[in-house]
Image: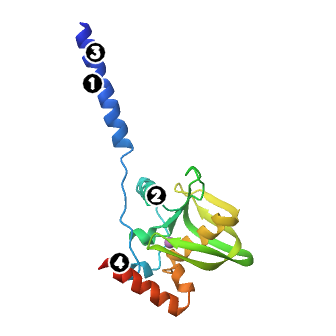
Amino acid sequence: MSVRDFLSKRYTAALSAILRFKRQHKMTLLKILHHPDPRLRTKATPVETFDSGLTAFAQNMLETMYAAPGIGLAATQVNVHKRIIVVDVSEANDQPHTLINPVLETHGKKIKSEEGCLSVPEIYESVERFEYVNVTAQGVDGRPIEFTADGMLSICIQHECDHLEGKLFVDYLSSLKRGRISKKLRERVR
Ligand code: NI
């Protein structure tokens, strides 16, 4: 084999490796619904089938959340009305939680924190949440998950689970504030 053939073979191999990598890491960004879209008010139903489709969808949800960028996303927000949430409150985006059929038990006192939402863009308001949350859920493979969260993770999980009930953080605000926010969002769409 000539050097030229050898190099050309290597080049082809490298090129196909790059293409393979790009294919495997192709990001699928899902479209996020914005308030006041009525579909955000849908109550999600439990996940019963744990298959490769669920794994791929959860991965797309994570990629959509990171790209937004956000720290949590519920399936409701991408118009899939199944009980699936993803959260990652780490700074390096390296501690993802994918929670299927999450059930929460809240504990502690109520604390105020500033919240935002990818479905209510550029609006930040103070909302009361419980300090601690005990989470029971399933992983994408159906295995049971249980843990207790506090701080930002606790708040974020409570916020995302509200989405599965068709509830938004703005629902906790006074009707005056809610009205102002709806007006602002409608003006932005125009
Ligand atoms: Ni949200």
**Image quarter of the N terminus:** top left
Residue on which the image places disc 4:
188
Look at mark 2 in the image and give the residue it sits on: 58
Single out the mark in the foreground, 2 or 3. 3
Chosen colour scheme:
rainbow
Q: Which mark is residue 12?
A: 1
Residue at the disc numbered 3? 7
121 vs 17, left or right, is right
Q: Is mark 3 within 8 Å of ligand 1?
A: no
Say what secondary structure mark 2 lies in: helix
Tell me the kind of residue under disc 3: Leu
Q: Between marks 1 and 4, how big is the CA–CA gap?
A: 49 Å
Q: Is residue 157 above or below residue 185?
A: above
- Cα distance between the residues tagged 3 and 4: 55 Å
Check if mark 4's residue and mark 2's residue have beta carbons within 8 Å.
no
Q: Measuring 47% from the left and 56% from the top, which residue is drawn there?
A: 66
Viewer-nearest residue: 22 or 114: 114
In this view, the mark in front (2 or 1) = 1
Rendered location of residue 104, percent (x, y): 64, 72
Answer yes or no: is residue 37 visible: no
Label 4 – label 2 distance at C-alpha: 30 Å
Is disc 4 surrounded by few (<14), some (14 to 19) or many (20+) residues within 10 Å?
A: few
Instruction: Name the amino acid type tagged 1.
Output: Thr
Between the C-alphas of marks 2 and 3, the distance is 41 Å
Instruction: Count residues near mark 1 (Cα–Cα under 10 Å), then give few for <14, some for 14-19, many for 20+.
Output: few
* Residue name at image x 42 percent, y 85 percent: 182
In the rendered image, which quarter is residue 169 located in?
Answer: bottom right
